[in-house]
Amino acid sequence: MTYGLNSSFKRQLNNKTKNKRLLAVIILVLIIMFSIVLNEREGGATPKEVVKRWTKTVKNDEFEKMFDYIHFDNKRDKDESVQEFKKISKEEKYKLDMLKTFVNDNEIDEDKMIDLDTFIVRFKKINEKDNFDKKYLINDGRGFLTVEKHNGRWFLKKNQLW
């Protein structure tokens, strides 16, 4: 009779252990999903992070995705900018080539606070000899991007890329 109680008790323990393992797996999956969702949010947690993500989209030729890192007042403005970008990419492809060359030839150097909600992120040449050979800078010759904070996330200021 004692044997029957022990096996019943062991089954209960096994069921509890299985439930705990299942719960642990579910929690782990939720944590992974939550972190993926947070990483795919628009903007960035820091000024440098948003610029890193933006440069990554340019390096990977994901030009339309780069708009996720630029601040727009509303979705309509963002959609209009994407359409304008598509027009530029067809008619003035050299602008995209210049942008990609800039991103590939430079790296993030420093970020400098202008005020609590505005930073400037400066770039520097990866290869010093390139400073003499060519100078592809963003649009108007700047070697930096302005980053602004909106609703707790950092975004590139619009209208500074072309």
Image (tube, rainbow, N blue to C red):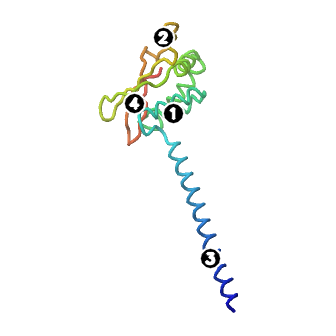
Residue that sits furthest to the bottom in the current view: 1
In this figure, which residue is indicated by the disc labeled 3? 13
Disc 1 residue type (three-letter): Arg
Residue type for callout 3:
Leu
Q: CA distance from mark 1 to mark 3?
A: 48 Å
- Image location (x, y in percent) of residue 95: 54, 17
Say left or right for 3 vs 140: right
Image position of 16 with respect to 104: above or below = below
Residue 53 is tagged as 1
Q: Earlier in the sequence, mark 4 or mark 1?
A: 1
Q: Residues within 10 Å of mark 1 (few under 14, many from 20)?
A: some
Between the C-alphas of marks 1 and 2, the distance is: 25 Å
Discs 1, 2 touching: Cβ within 8 Å: no
Mark 2 or mark 1, which is nearer the start of the sequence? Answer: 1
Residue identifier under label 4: 147
Tell me where residue 144 appears, x and y as whole percent: 42, 22
User: Badge 2 is on which residue?
Assistant: 131
Which of disc 4 and disc 2 is earlier in sequence?
Answer: 2
Instruction: Give the mark toward the camera: 2 or 4.
Output: 2
Question: What numbered label is drawn on residue 36?
Answer: none
Mark 4 crowdedness (10 Å alpha carbons): few <14, some 14-19, many ≥20: many
Measure the alpha-carbon separation of dots 2 and 4.
Answer: 25 Å
Say which element carries label 3.
Answer: helix
Q: Are marks 4 and 1 in contact (CB under 8 Å)?
A: no
> Of label 4 and label 3, which has the lower sequence position?
3
- Residue appearing at x 52%, y 11% in the figure: 130
